Image (spheres, rainbow, N blue to C red):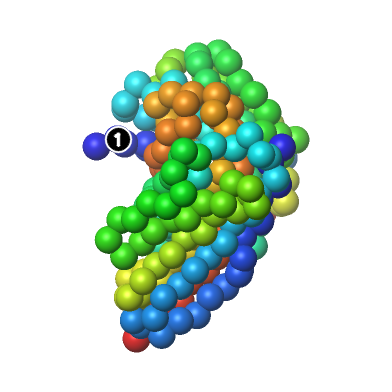
Amino acid sequence: GENVEQHPSTLSVQEGDSAVIKCTYSDSASNYFPWYKQELGKRPQLIIDIRSNVGEKKDQRIAVTLNKTAKHFSLHITETQPEDSAVYFCAPLKYNFNKFYFGSGTKLNVKP
Amino acid sequence: DVKVTQSSRYLVKRTGEKVFLECVQDMDHENMFWYRQDPGLGLRLIYFSYDVKMKEKGDIPEGYSVSREKKERFSLILESASTNQTSMYLCASSPSDSGEKLFFGSGTQLSVL
């Protein structure tokens, strides 16, 4: 199956700073690239996703960028706030193949 | 709003017991999944189902089986629970096979003593 790696595994930033989490994958046929956020004690929820026909997508303070050639995509959070503290997972997927393989997660801590 | 409901939030069982974890979704989704979540390992896929009575193995199916007799319900079965199956179990569903978002249940924390 897909080999998915996330870096870093933990990230600590000061409130207001930016945070970047990178996800690398092995299957060049992957064409759907979501990021999930899991707050402590809660279920994972989709926060942003991108498909392979675009290189970047923004939604307020979060953005996802995709580099298909290098087989990685990144989550960018600007002006971080304490409520951004959570574990973030990537889960690249290829079309018509529904096994979502998740990265091992990145624990983001935003210090007030 | 999509609702994925897992029958138990916390469960304590003894080694060797047969354990059933139930999951129900209310949005007529074709696909349903069972993951286990362990610290540092992320979410690992145990089994998934893309239709009633259909199932496919994920990465770690050993020691588990599943049942999908109705579209809305997907059950995970531990035939003989072992201590290394102590984990958080997450059920999820998605509406199609074209790469759509997963909707997760709130999870079942299973402890096997």
Give the quadrant of the C terminus of chain B: bottom right
Q: How many numbered badges does the structure rendering display? A: 1
| Whether residue B11 is situated above or below residue A96 in the rendered picture | below
> Residue sitting at 61 percent across and 43 percent down?
A101
Amino acid found under the numbered disc labelled 1: Val
Q: Chain of mark 1?
A: B
Front residue of B78/A63: it is A63
In the rendered image, the residue lying farthest to the left is B1
Front residue of A83/A64: it is A64
In the rendered image, the residue lying farthest to the right is B62
- Tell me if mark 1 has few (under 14), some (14-19) or many (20+) residues whose alpha carbon lies within 10 angstroms of its own: few
> Residue sitting at 50 percent across and 14 percent down?
B52
> Residue sitting at 45 percent across and 81 percent down?
A13
| Whether residue B54 is situated above or below residue B84 in the rendered picture | above
Q: Which residue is mark 1?
A: B2
Front residue of B77/B92: it is B92
Q: Is residue B77 visible?
A: no
> What is the x, y in percent for residue B50?
52, 21
Callout 1 secondary element: loop
Question: Is B111 left, or right, of A16 in this rendering?
Answer: right
> What is the x, y in percent for residue A26?
70, 45
Question: Is A4 left, or right, of B69 in this rendering?
Answer: right
> What is the x, y in percent for residue B47?
62, 31
> Residue sitting at 35 percent across and 82 percent down?
A15
> What is the x, y in percent for residue B9?
43, 49
Q: Quadrant of residue A110?
A: bottom left
Give the quadrant of the N terminus of chain B: top left
Question: Is B103 left, or right, of A97 in this rendering?
Answer: left
Front residue of A43/B6: it is A43
| Whether residue A56 is situated above or below residue B59 in the rendered picture | below
